[in-house]
């Protein structure tokens, strides 16, 4: 963006804008650190959920194949109960993927990138203001 740096005609004006930029950059850098932390946590959680989901799907598939061959017994009832629990857990993990799965990882990456762009632009503006500040009167 083109900033109206020609409006800065004294060092005092430059210092006021630089102080404002410093505060904005401090906040953005904190948000960036938080976004990176969240991204790392979300990535770890997503990987754990994907591993658990793969295990559950394999277990459910094998149980569905085996169950019809098991005669009515306490063992069959236990397997049916386990299948029900595994299916519920699988469904819960699938429902949570939008919040804590690959989509959440991507959202955190987008947030970190957006913050990077803002930080870089404002840091460049800060550099530009410092460059014109030198020869200006107080």
Image (tube, rainbow, N blue to C red):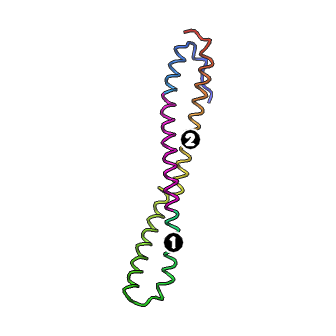
Q: Name the residue under label 1.
A: 57
Instruction: Name the residue nearer the viewer: 75 or 7.
Output: 75
Which residue, as the protein is rendered here, is positioned at the far top?
137
**If the image is split into quadrants, where does the N terminus sit?**
top right
Mark 2 burial class by Cα count in 10 Å: few <14, some 14-19, many 20+ = few
Task: Using the image, determine if residue 101 lies above or below residue 27.
Answer: below
Q: Is residue 5 left or right of residue 31?
A: right
**If the image is split into quadrants, where does the C terminus sit?**
top right
The percent position of residue 62, horizontal first and vertical second, equals: 51, 79
Residue 76 shows which numbered tag?
Answer: none
Residue extent of the magenta highlight: 23-49
Q: How far apart are marks 2 and 1 (CA)?
A: 36 Å
Residue drawn at (40%, 89%), measured in percent from left and top?
A: 72
Which quadrant of the structure image shows residue 89?
A: bottom left
Of label 2 and label 1, which has the lower sequence position?
A: 1
The percent position of residue 102, horizontal first and vertical second, equals: 54, 56
Instruction: Give the SS element for disc 1.
Output: helix
Residue drawn at (52%, 14%), measured in percent from left and top?
A: 12
Question: Marks 1 and 2: in contact by CB < 8 Å?
Answer: no
Q: Name the residue under label 2.
A: 114
């Amino acid at each position: 963006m083109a900033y109206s740096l020609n409006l800065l005609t004294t060092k005092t004006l430059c210092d006021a804008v630089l102080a404002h930029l410093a505060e904005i950059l401090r906040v953005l850098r904190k948000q960036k650190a938080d976004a990176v932390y969240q991204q790392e946590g979300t990535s770890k959680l997503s990987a754990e959920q994907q591993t658990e989901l793969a295990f559950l799907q394999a277990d459910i598939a094998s149980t569905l194949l085996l169950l019809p061959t098991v005669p009515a017994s306490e063992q069959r009832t236990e397997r049916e109960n386990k299948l029900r629990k595994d299916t519920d857990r699988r469904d819960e993990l699938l429902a949570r993927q939008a919040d804590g799965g690959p989509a959440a990882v991507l959202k955190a990456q987008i947030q970190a990138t957006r913050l990077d762009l803002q930080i870089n632009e404002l840091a460049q503006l800060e550099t530009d203001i410092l460059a014109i500040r030198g020869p200006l009167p107080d």
